[in-house]
Image: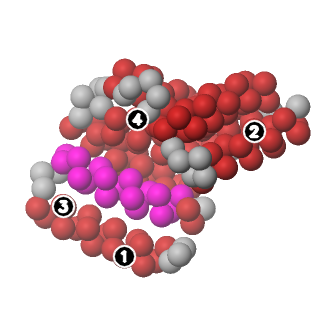
Amino acid sequence: MGDYSKALEFYQKALKIYEISRPPNHPELAGSYNNIGSVYNNMGDYSKALEFYQKALKIDEISQPSTHPDLATSYNNIGDVYNSMGDYSKALEFHQKALKIRENALPPNHHDFAQSYNNIGMVYSGKGDYSKALSFLEKALVIFQKSLAPNHLHIKMVTNSIDDVKKKM
């Protein structure tokens, strides 16, 4: 676990295959860019992560309808990077775009809503707006509890985030 150089190597190989075998704005290219961006994000190389996430978003904006969940994923990923960089206003902007798409494209208790609520809650926590953070994190927890197994890691993580926010209030 955590072998980022290997992950990058294989994701870049996949990207090269897609670049040869697919049209330039094919959604699978966006998926590859998102995967590479995720590796850089996990490594803490936020500028590289942002570069690849933005490439994915550009393809998604061209190849997908404006309400497609893949667009929400790209917005979410970019929001995560901005949150990690401490640019909370941009993080909130992108997470809210992701949430809006999910509201139009997914059933109300879909776990992706919980992801959006959690991420928005974490942005508000970073901004020091703990009451808003708590509200969004609690929404995330309710959906995760309805859509995931009781011992799922996401439930534990959101519960811990709620506890952390309550301590800061």
Identify the mark at residue 72; answer none if there is no mark: 4
In the rendered structure, which amino acid carries the disc numbered 3?
Answer: Glu
Left or right for 87, reference 101: right
What residue is rendered at 26% in x and 68% in y? 14
Look at mark 2 in the image and give the residue it sits on. Answer: 162
Name which of mark 3 and mark 4 comes first in the sequence: 3
What residue is rendered at 29% in x and 26% in y? 66
Q: Is residue 114 visible?
A: no
Q: Secondary structure at mark 2?
A: helix
CA gap between label 3 and label 4 equals 23 Å
In the rendered structure, which amino acid carries the disc numbered 1?
Answer: Glu
The picture places residue 104, in percent across and down from the top left corner, at 37, 21
Numbered disc in front, either 3 or 4: 4
Start-end of magenta stretch: 25-41
CA gap between label 3 and label 1 equals 15 Å
What residue is rendered at 38% in x and 26% in y? 107
Look at mark 3 in the image and give the residue it sits on. Answer: 19
In the rendered structure, which amino acid carries the disc numbered 4?
Answer: Ala
Identify the mark at residue 9; answer none if there is no mark: 1
In the rendered structure, which amino acid carries the disc numbered 2?
Answer: Ile
Q: Secondary structure at mark 1?
A: helix
